[in-house]
Image (cartoon, rainbow, N blue to C red):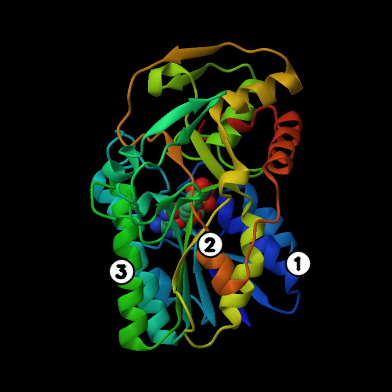
Amino acid sequence: MRILISGICGFVGSWLARGLREAEPTWEIFGFDNFVREGSEVNRAALREMGIKVHHADLRAASDLEALPAANVVIDAAANPSVLAGVDGKSSSRQLLEHNLGGTINLLEYCRRHSVAFLLLSTSRVYSVPGMSAVPVRVQGQRLVPEIRECVTGLSERGFAEDFSTVPPLSLYGSSKLASEILALEYGSVFQFPVWINRCGVLAGAGQFGRADQGIYSFWLHSWKARRPLRYLGFGGHGHQVRDALHPLDLIPLLRKQIAATTHTGERITNVAGGVANSMSLAELSAWAEDRWGPHEVIRDGTERPFDLPWIVLDSTRVQETWGWSVQTPLTKILEEIAQHAETHPHWLSLTGG
Ligand SMILES: NC(=O)c1ccc[n+]([C@@H]2O[C@H](COP(=O)([O-])OP(=O)(O)OC[C@H]3O[C@@H](n4cnc5c(N)ncnc54)[C@H](O)[C@@H]3O)[C@@H](O)[C@H]2O)c1
């Protein structure tokens, strides 16, 4: 089996490459990256030492992909993954779409040419921002919890399910991923290759590159340890907003099953996320950090930001039923892993664009 991973030197791509190498030592794992993400360079040597070939290629350049060897399966882990991308002044909207949507098209052309399966890492950000904002929430201890009084399709106390609204606005990032999903399903159907779409919530673990808008758990703990300024933004400045978290290695058993499936059985779009049990608010995360490293001031700043949401937890019931998948790594273990990384890499944030 030959597995091609795009964005292989990114946070998720590199974890998946290492995880698959360990789970399936006889498989050939290779991939490519254009190293646009600050910090991705640090993974190149370690992957090579594991016998994983890393090509330097840009998803936006069709000719770069034409030069790559054939694989049996493509895992797409290359994107600009920030919900503020294209509107934050750091990247233009065109750049975002060229990476996230144009890049998917080039990968789908690769899959068509070689007749190989396509696994897309998608996101909770495909769900409607007004829809998710409209969920009533109340404060319970240090966090917000949903107060579901009426029936809304795809919403329960377990989180947002796959049939929750995807009507824009979603953010440019979310729209680029939703459009990628649609094109992937279309290509798979027209050109007869398997397509699996995994909508992930927050993925978290050691080695995540440091930015608040992408990788909040890692950013927060590294910042606390380094006594860098931190802010509770929006929602009254209390830090009660909640996210679930999943370790990227928890995706491995699912990906192995999807790779082994040669025909489509069951659902092709599934949420794969930490869920309620693996969720936390920023204020709870601060309490965890304070326990470990002592106090650090967090500035309360109620300024609202575009696309910010009080409670994002995904309901992964469908993937449990379809693939027998479940969360393996509890949130406490993820936090411990990140904390140890922060203790051994005190300059991580400045090395990785934080
Ligand atoms: N991290 C999360 O919480 C999360 C959650 C849901 C979905 N995802 C998805 O997982 C994937 C990986 O996210 P991540 O957190 O590892 O991001 P990341 O920024 O750490 O990694 C992305 C990698 O892709 C590379 N890349 C970007 N554009 C490229 C291009 N044009 N050509 C070649 N390489 C390119 C970057 O250099 C980087 O190494 C993304 O598709 C993202 O949408 C991530």
Is label 3 in a helix, a strand or a loop? helix
Tell me the mark number nearer the camera, choosing from 3 and 1: 3
Q: Residue at x 70, y 51 (%)?
A: 329
What label does residue 22 carry, if any?
A: 1
Is label 2 in a helix, a strand or a loop? helix
Image position, residue 74 (x, y; %):
50, 73
Residue type marked 3: Ile
Is label 1 in a helix, a strand or a loop? helix
**Mark positioned earlier in the residue sequence (3 or 1):** 1
Residue type marked 2: Thr
The residue closer to the viewer here, 46 or 300, is 300
- Quadrant of the rendered structure where residue 13 is? bottom right
Q: Residue furthest front?
A: 149
**Mark positioned earlier in the residue sequence (2 or 1):** 1
Q: Is residue 337 above or below residue 49?
A: above
Q: Residue at x 70, y 31 (%)?
A: 342
Q: Is residue 276 visible?
A: yes
Mark 3 vs 1: CB contact within 8 A = no
| Distance from the alpha carbon under mark 3 to that under mark 1 | 32 Å
**Mark positioned earlier in the residue sequence (3 or 2):** 3
Q: Residue at x 51, y 66 (%)?
A: 318
Image position, residue 6 (x, y; %):
50, 64
Residue to which mark 2 is pinned: 317
Q: How many marks?
A: 3
